[in-house]
Image: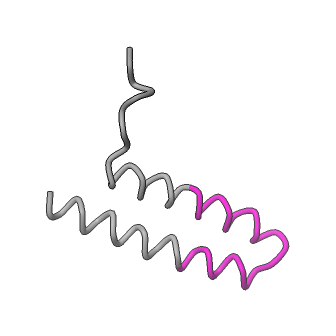
Amino acid sequence: MFSIFKKKTSLEKLQDRHAKLLQEAFVLSKSNRSASDVKMVEAQKVEQQIDDLQRNA
């Protein structure tokens, strides 16, 4: 009922950031391939952080 007051965990924040970066990379892939590649590298780094968090939890 009060889920709007629930704070996101660091894992949820990283997952949201990862999804956002992938979406930006997809949009950029249609117009600017090099910028899309940069976003994909950032998304891979965030994905590695997610994996590290899940392994340590």
Q: Position of residue 4 (x, y in %)?
A: 45, 27
Residue 43 lies left or right of residue 32; in this view the side is left
Number of marks in the image? 0
Query: Going by the image, does 8 lie left or right of 35?
Result: left
How far across and how far down the image is residue 30, in percent? 81, 69
Identify the image quadrant of residue 56: bottom left
Q: Is the N terminus in the top left, top right, bottom left or bottom right quadrant?
A: top left
Q: Position of residue 32 (x, y in %)?
A: 80, 78
What's the residue at 64%, 81% (across, down)? Answer: 37
Magenta region includes residue 40 = yes
Q: How is the image coloured?
A: one colour
Q: Quadrant of residue 10?
A: bottom left
Q: Residue furthest right?
A: 31
Quadrant of residue 35 in the image? Answer: bottom right
Please provide the residue range marked out in magenta: 20-41
In the rendered image, the quadrant that contains the C terminus is: bottom left
Identify the residue at the far front of this view.
5
The x and y percentages for residue 33 are 75, 80
24 to 8, vertically: above or below: below
Dominant secondary structure, magenta: helix
In this view, the residue farthest toward the left is 56
Question: Which residue is rendered at x = 76% and y = 69% of the image?
Answer: 28
On whether residue 51 falls in the magenta region, the answer is no
In depth, the one of 17 and 23 nearer the eye is 17
The structure residue drawn at horizontal position 62% and vertical position 81%, both measured from the top left corner, is: 38
Q: 42 left or right of 13? A: right
Q: Residue furthest top?
A: 1
